[in-house]
Image (cartoon, helix red, strand yellow):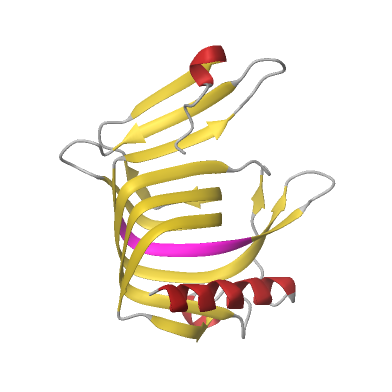
């Protein structure tokens, strides 16, 4: 299991460093954290890309893009640091920690890092990324699987999109000052 993940990460990084993998998305430049006890997904695809920060400098960030046709996230946590001058602020969102998980359709995640214990069903590694997504760079590295299961998920992301995102038991909290300390998902 670890060998395919290591090979994938190396190939994606090589594709990004050589300019072979691209993505045409503009982002804020700020990252956020997502954690879940478990993610169960169908229709998994992954390939590399880049995102550009909005603004005159337009700094470029290499990313890994993951697409999941349908996903269930158990005990979902999302946090973002939003500090004000001299005042720590952390925004947290929690959902799916009861009987029902949070659910997403056509989930797209642009991430800097991902940690957890993953199991892929019928994985194909080394696909041309344009076979997975026509907007990917032709000849760049990709992988896909029928199903993905990730336990103890921790990821640092640049953006996330979904056709629908059902946050069962949604709780949003702005943690300010001393309350902000230790409130990030991990």
> Magenta part mainly helix, strand or loop?
strand
**Quadrant of residue 166 in the image?**
top left
Near-viewer residue (45 or 179) = 179
Q: Is residue 105 among the parts visible in the rendering?
A: yes
User: Which residues, given as a range, are shown in magenta?
Assistant: 63-71
In the visual, does 20 lie left or right of 122?
A: right
Q: Is residue 52 above or below residue 169?
A: below
Q: Is residue 79 magenta?
A: no
Residue 70 on the magenta segment: yes
Could you tell me residue 72's position as x and y percent? 27, 52
Which residue shows up at 61% across the image and 27% down it?
82
Residue 11 x, y percent position in the rendering: 59, 78
- Residue found at the very far front of the displayed protein: 2
Kindly identify the residue that appears in the image at 64 percent across and 24 percent down. Answer: 83
Q: Is residue 60 left or right of residue 88?
A: right
Residue at position x 67%, y 51% from top?
26
Q: Quadrant of the N terminus?
A: bottom left
- Residue at left offset 61%, top offset 20%: 88
């Amino acid at each position: 299991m670890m060998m395919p993940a290591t090979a994938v990460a190396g190939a994606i990084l090589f594709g990004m460093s050589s300019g072979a993998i691209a993505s045409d998305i503009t982002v804020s430049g700020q990252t956020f954290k997502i954690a879940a006890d478990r993610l169960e997904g169908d229709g998994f695809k992954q390939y590399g890309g880049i995102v550009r920060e909005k603004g005159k400098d337009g700094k470029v960030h290499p990313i890994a893009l993951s697409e999941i046709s349908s996903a269930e996230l158990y005990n979902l946590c999302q946090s973002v640091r939003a500090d004000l001058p001299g005042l720590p602020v952390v925004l947290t969102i929690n959902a799916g920690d009861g009987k029902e998980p949070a659910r997403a359709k056509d989930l797209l995640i642009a991430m800097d890092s991902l940690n957890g214990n993953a199991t892929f069903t019928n994985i194909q590694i080394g696909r041309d990324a344009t076979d997975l997504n026509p907007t990917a760079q032709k000849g760049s590295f990709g992988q896909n699987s029928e199903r993905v299961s990730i336990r103890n998920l921790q990821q640092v992301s640049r953006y996330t999109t979904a056709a629908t995102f059902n946050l069962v038991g949604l709780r949003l909290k702005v943690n300010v000052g001393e309350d902000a300390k230790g409130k990030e998902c991990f």
